[in-house]
Amino acid sequence: MEQIMTLVEPRPAATSAKLPSDEGVLLVEGEDQPGLIQAITTVLHESGANIVSLDQYSDNPEGGHFFQRTVFHLPDFTAAREDLEAKLDKVISDDFGLTWRLNDRSVPKRVAILASTSDHCLLDLLWRHRRGEIPMTVSMVISNHTNVANDVRSFGIPFFHVPSQGADKSAAEAEIVRLLRGNVDLVVLARYMQILSPSFLENVEVPVINIHHSFLPAFIGAGPYKKAKERGVKLIGATAHYVTEDLDEGPIIEQDVARVDHSMTAADMQRKGANVERAVLSRAVTWHCEDRVIRHGRETVIF
Amino acid sequence: MEQIMTLVEPRPAATSAKLPSDEGVLLVEGEDQPGLIQAITTVLHESGANIVSLDQYSDNPEGGHFFQRTVFHLPDFTAAREDLEAKLDKVISDDFGLTWRLNDRSVPKRVAILASTSDHCLLDLLWRHRRGEIPMTVSMVISNHTNVANDVRSFGIPFFHVPSQGADKSAAEAEIVRLLRGNVDLVVLARYMQILSPSFLENVEVPVINIHHSFLPAFIGAGPYKKAKERGVKLIGATAHYVTEDLDEGPIIEQDVARVDHSMTAADMQRKGANVERAVLSRAVTWHCEDRVIRHGRETVIF
Amino acid sequence: MEQIMTLVEPRPAATSAKLPSDEGVLLVEGEDQPGLIQAITTVLHESGANIVSLDQYSDNPEGGHFFQRTVFHLPDFTAAREDLEAKLDKVISDDFGLTWRLNDRSVPKRVAILASTSDHCLLDLLWRHRRGEIPMTVSMVISNHTNVANDVRSFGIPFFHVPSQGADKSAAEAEIVRLLRGNVDLVVLARYMQILSPSFLENVEVPVINIHHSFLPAFIGAGPYKKAKERGVKLIGATAHYVTEDLDEGPIIEQDVARVDHSMTAADMQRKGANVERAVLSRAVTWHCEDRVIRHGRETVIF
Amino acid sequence: MEQIMTLVEPRPAATSAKLPSDEGVLLVEGEDQPGLIQAITTVLHESGANIVSLDQYSDNPEGGHFFQRTVFHLPDFTAAREDLEAKLDKVISDDFGLTWRLNDRSVPKRVAILASTSDHCLLDLLWRHRRGEIPMTVSMVISNHTNVANDVRSFGIPFFHVPSQGADKSAAEAEIVRLLRGNVDLVVLARYMQILSPSFLENVEVPVINIHHSFLPAFIGAGPYKKAKERGVKLIGATAHYVTEDLDEGPIIEQDVARVDHSMTAADMQRKGANVERAVLSRAVTWHCEDRVIRHGRETVIF
């Protein structure tokens, strides 16, 4: 047995995901019209881009809503980007009246995670982040408690404690907004047990993803696992969704369930539910960071 | 190619399941007390029964509710039954104050299926019945429509048409009760789209199992698949349950889900939902007919 | 209760699936090259076609193999088809050197099902066919036994008995080829327990899909469920694949598994396995009939 | 934002699972005979034990092999244990000739985890251990590499580096045996990429659980994910089993699969496979530590 006296290789906070270089991802959506795909692929082709993958969906080929995600390879993407954007704007916005956005696949999303005392969703994200499974950089973790501080910092990630006691949450929310604004592209609520105000959502200016448990049928209010147990449900689940002003009612990104039976206590069911929650949230965050999700009203298209 | 001029082997209406002979299944439930399992197994042992399987559950070992399912082999079960029942009653009812019932595993449950125009759940049951997968005899199929008549009769099973038009369903219900009473041990609502009155449940005197679709979150009212589509759900499901006076709220026997995505229309989702419904209902009916389900308030214990 | 004296509505043998009219599906594959998608969509656009959906995949954007499935709407498709095909051939075959095929979505695939004594896969297909779930016409069922004849004919579908006894199967195979050739677009082996010769595959001239059970680990030879039981496996599965000269080794279309445990007998496992088999085969046949499967060597791309 | 200057609550290496006190778990197996359950439950009842749960299985009620797991509550279990064991031995061993073992549920299993460079299985176990999901104490982690050392020690668990280079592994194995012997009740190979010799298994004297990937069909040799990709498989899986002299052929404890498709690279498949591996291994270790697994030849009974 050899003694290891020194710490082995410091671990980077930034993502270790191998991100593709010279690749862009183009998301387009708007009113479906003949010739759209042809027009978009023509711009890309004439700009020297080679299409790596193209996903497209229309909720009604006759006058419905059109969605497209195109990944392409373009040598010297950084240099060529401005010119390409001008051409895309001309065709997609001006000619067809659709909206679009272009992202550089070599740039990971900057993500803040908000948590409370439960660590299962938080740690699953940090862990997958370190394994390079998600194209993101975790810029910070914010919690209204301190018990996850050590774990977070052991991943080399900043931890900020923002207490949130009392009825008036406005000071806490303002502080969180100060920490986030300009610094992140996505906020993930990893079992953050504080209700955020509509003004927070407005001020934070980036998408917010939440996870909550789900049951068939639904159980309202406190102690849902206890209620599910009393009702004899055989499946428990979790739903990840974008946060909107309608609490727990925003566009769904991902859902999953696990099987339970009479021999499980409410605590057993909650533990199994936690495993579903972390899996569902991690998939939702991954898909968002890979620019696979397009929101459309209360629906999502996942490419 | 050979000509086949005559019909090949007529198909029996009764179950083709190979049912075990000389085997009993004993279900016991009531207040948990020390010594219960020992007392029950002692009666069985002293009566010459050999235990094939024993499942037991207590929702709280300290003063909770106790459930036990015991399958045993007893030579000449029919002859020995009366004597065994007297002994079981002495110990289980008199000494411990619990309730019990004993069934002969060689006797299939007599089942009536009620259906409307949808045939997916009905045909799945008839088909599994013919394959010998469920220890039941399908005594009759009753429908308020006629479109499934031919299919049912091609399985050698009686079909009865009981129309159910107008606001007053009492005459139709009364006719159904006349057909069922004394003839069946279980009623299965296989997408029977009529609401049954509390008095029907009382008069029919046997358990009634129903199947309905389930979503996370739940959608109330008509057109649930359309609503689920608009809400962007990623899972659709089905729930089989015992019918009680609380519509769709009785004890759950089984649930399952299937994955859907944005590219599916409401009709696609409904078709996929139908496949979940038939699988879930068939499992629930099988478990009931195998005496694996014990109801306890709004819960079920499934052994 | 009303008497129903006459048979209710005769059931059509042809598919009841509502097939889209004026829609084509174009499958393209070959060496990946820049500008492919743009070129193909340009031909479609200039021919007046509106793209309904487009799926595309390249196994390596730099010089890999390219696959595309495009569904489009084109008014008066039948009349416009010849002209469109000429243009597609010019661009896809001549300019880019790729292979392609175009199908009319209003025309169901003509399918022959070969079965032996097991009926679970056969009946699942006939049933889904009647429910309109699969865009196919079942032209005939051929079996080396007669026990499924009645069932098949009750669906209004021709049944042919081709016995296959003795070591020399060449006469039987020749008769089957005579029945099939020119009449069908797909042959489905629904638990057909005869090994087909390479010359059969060559002479039948259409794709052949087979289903077989699968285990982790695999069990060679007879009685696989018994071996799986002895080995204590916890999952049993099924694989649907195209038949090639390498028995059971052709390109995989679909796979699935179900959970088993120690309390199940080999017969229980076989019954559960049958349910997996019929689900997997039905999905594979559906995808094939929807032109969603592109074969490439021993792989399949499923759009 | 408050400054947190000090480390928050040190984390214990021992399990945080709340283990039940005054509860025993009795495992019995051997030749099935009439009266077994009655005899065992009578001993327990007469010793003042109250049965919490009883699972029983016989692979053939007529002269097969019998398995039983009984959890019971017995006040002052520690004091009463010796007396109870004497009575159990009298009845189970002497009268019936079966084997049995009795464990105290308040005592967690002492576990050693062996790992190499991959950390997904290792960290999942450490994490669930810290969350109290598994009734075990992780006594040590041993690796032939050092890259997981920091992670392990951050959980408060000893890490030992035992290099294993060169053809002769006997010195390394001997050192591992010295570390383990007498200190642990279970060895878990969490992607430990060294082949252990039969003599290691003999010397370590406790059960060894391993995890490996599984495919339908199986792929032999190096680079299985690449081979699975080339073969177009649609499911990838993992198997956890007890290690025996037959490499990767020991009794299976748990298996599971995940769905893959053509668009995934071999690396994507490997990543998804890693998630299946960690879930399957964690379930297998949990069940073993809960005394739910009884080995019987190449099979396992999981209660």
Image: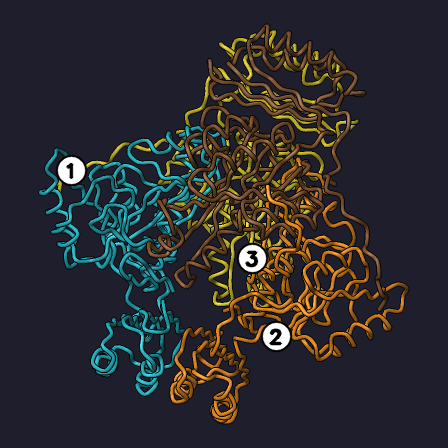
Chain colours: A yellow, B orange, C brown, D cyan
Residue that badge 2 annotates: B297
x, y percent for residue A187: 55, 37
x, y percent for residue B69: 48, 76
Indicate the chain on which mark 3 is placed.
Answer: A
- Residue A158 visible, this orientation: no
Question: Which amino acid type is marked by label 3?
Answer: Leu
Contact, mark 2 vs mark 1 (Cβ under 8 Å): no
Q: Quadrant of the N terminus of chain A?
A: top left
Residue that badge 3 annotates: A235
Q: Residue at x 48, y 65 (%)?
A: A264
Have a look at marks 1 and 3 and say if they share a chain.
no
x, y percent for residue C157: 69, 43
Q: Residue at x 64, y 27 (%)?
A: C182
Q: Secondary structure at mark 3?
A: strand
Indicate the chain on which mark 1 is placed.
Answer: D
Quarter of the image holding residue A12? top left
Label 2 and label 3: CA atoms lie apart by: 19 Å
Indicate the chain on which mark 2 is placed.
Answer: B
Q: On screen, B100 above or below C139? A: below
Residue that badge 1 annotates: D164
- Mark 3: few, some, or many residues within 10 Å (few <14, many ≥20)? many
Label 2 and label 1: CA atoms lie apart by: 60 Å
Have a look at marks 2 and 3 and say if they share a chain.
no
Q: Report whether B154 appears left or right of B65.
A: right
Q: On screen, D183 above or below C159? A: below
Question: Which amino acid type is marked by label 2?
Answer: Gly
x, y percent for residue C290: 64, 32
Q: Residue at x 69, y 25 (%)?
A: A29
Q: Report whether C285 appears left or right of A61.
A: left
Question: Which amino acid type is marked by label 1?
Answer: Ser
Front-lying residue, D292 or C168: C168
